[in-house]
Amino acid sequence: MDNIKFYVGPMSKNVVDAILEFTEETNNKIGFIPSRRQIEYNGGYVNNWTTKEFSEYVNGRVIIERDHGGIGQGYKHDDGIKSFMHDCKYFDKIHVDPWKEYQNLDEGLQETINCVNFIYLVMGKENVKFEVGTEESIRRFEVDELETLLR
């Protein structure tokens, strides 16, 4: 399930059901990529699902990747740690995105490292995969900055 090239935001229960049905009928590999506002440990706007409830509903049929996880990405401003604690229990991949809060390259890199280390070392989740970075509307990366990020 790691070679997924297409992810869908779970905008509603209807979208979730349609994607699950489509993947079962066609064997196409599609993943879900919920934001913290859509699906969150204390309920999101999609069916008021918690992270755990959404994961249980999907039941391993497709990969789930947290989109834009981290500080300042939920309904209320927070450090994102409680969300990460639930994400690493129930999701397959986590997008670590502190860039809304940290525009400075060094600070954003350090916060990215801190979040990955928290999930990997503190939570003991060596099997979780990560996506790092952000979208251009939040922070534009120059080529040399991307090279630094990847080192």
Image (cartoon, helix red, strand yellow):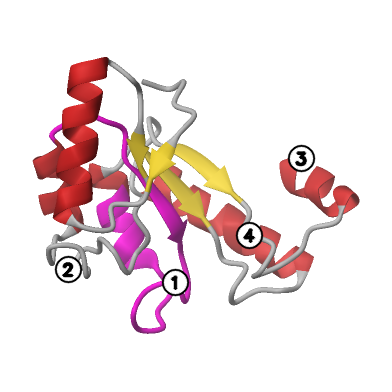
Mark toward the start of the polypeptide (4 vs 1) = 1
* Magenta span of residues: 59-87
Determine which quarter of the picture holds residue 29: top left
Residue hosting label 3: 151
Question: Looking at the picture, which amino acid does disc 2 mark?
Answer: Gly
Is 135 positioned to the left or the right of 75 in the image? right
Q: Looking at the image, can residue 11 be seen?
A: yes
Q: Residues within 10 Å of mark 3 (few under 14, many from 20)?
A: few
Question: Looking at the picture, which amino acid does disc 4 mark?
Answer: Glu
Across and down, in percent, residue 19 comes to: 24, 37
Identify which residue, 40 or 104, lies in the foreground: 40
Estimate the spatial distance between the alpha carbons at disc 2 and disc 3, rounded to whole Å. 35 Å
Residue hosting label 4: 135
**Are the residues flagged by discs 1 and 3 in contact, CB closer than 8 Å?**
no
**Are the residues flagged by discs 2 and 3 in contact, CB closer than 8 Å?**
no
Total of numbered circles in the picture? 4
Across and down, in percent, residue 87 comes to: 30, 51
